[in-house]
Amino acid sequence: APLARPDFIYARASSLDRPAVRAFAEASLTFAPALAEEVGMVPLLPETYALVRARLDARTEGSVFQDVRPGTSVGTVLTRAARPASP
């Protein structure tokens, strides 16, 4: 089986006020599935791209991938992060 790992792009929320940064982030999400397949990578599931877009639209900063066990899908991690915190 091939080795795999996700590729991440991080942008500070305040940087998204710059049109070029926002356009890059938007284009990255829009074209990532097709580009991934074109270069032989496996794209994320459409639901996962939707979770990423929600984080971008909400201008959510920071990673949710610290302390994540190897093999956990990106979609699983983002779904957990999107849930409201338990009291």
Image (cartoon, grey):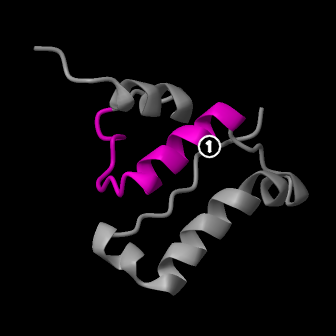
User: How many numbered callouts?
Assistant: 1
Could you tell me the amino acid type at mark 1?
Answer: Tyr
55 to the left or right of 75 = left
Q: Residue at x 33, y 24 (%)?
A: 83
Q: Residue at x 53, y 35 (%)?
A: 74
Residue 62 is situated, as x and y percent measured from the top left of the image, at 29, 53
Residue 18 sits in quarter: bottom left
Up the image or down, 8 lies above or below 79; here it is below
Give neighbour class at mark 1: few <14, some 14-19, many 20+ (Cα, 10 Å). Answer: some
For the C terminus, give its image quadrant: top left
Residue 29 appears in the picture as rendered: yes
Q: Is residue 50 magenta?
A: yes
Dot 1: what SS? helix
Stretch in magenta? 45-67
- Please identify the quarter of the rendering in which residue 10 is found: bottom left
> Which of 31 and 41 lies nearest the eye of the viewer?
31
Give the labeled residue for mark 1. 49
The image quadrant that residue 68 belongs to is top left
Image point (45%, 27%), residue name: 79
Left or right of 73, for residue 86: left
Estimate the x, y position of residue 23 in percent, counting from the top left: 58, 76
The answer to whether residue 61 is left or right of residue 37 is: left
Residue lying farthest to the left in this orientation: 87
Which residue is outermost to the right? 38
**Residue 49 percent location from the top left of the image:** 62, 43
Residue 45 visible in this rendered orientation of the protein: no
- Counting from the top left corner in percent of width and height, residue 34 is at 84, 55
Residue 30 position (above or below residue 49): below
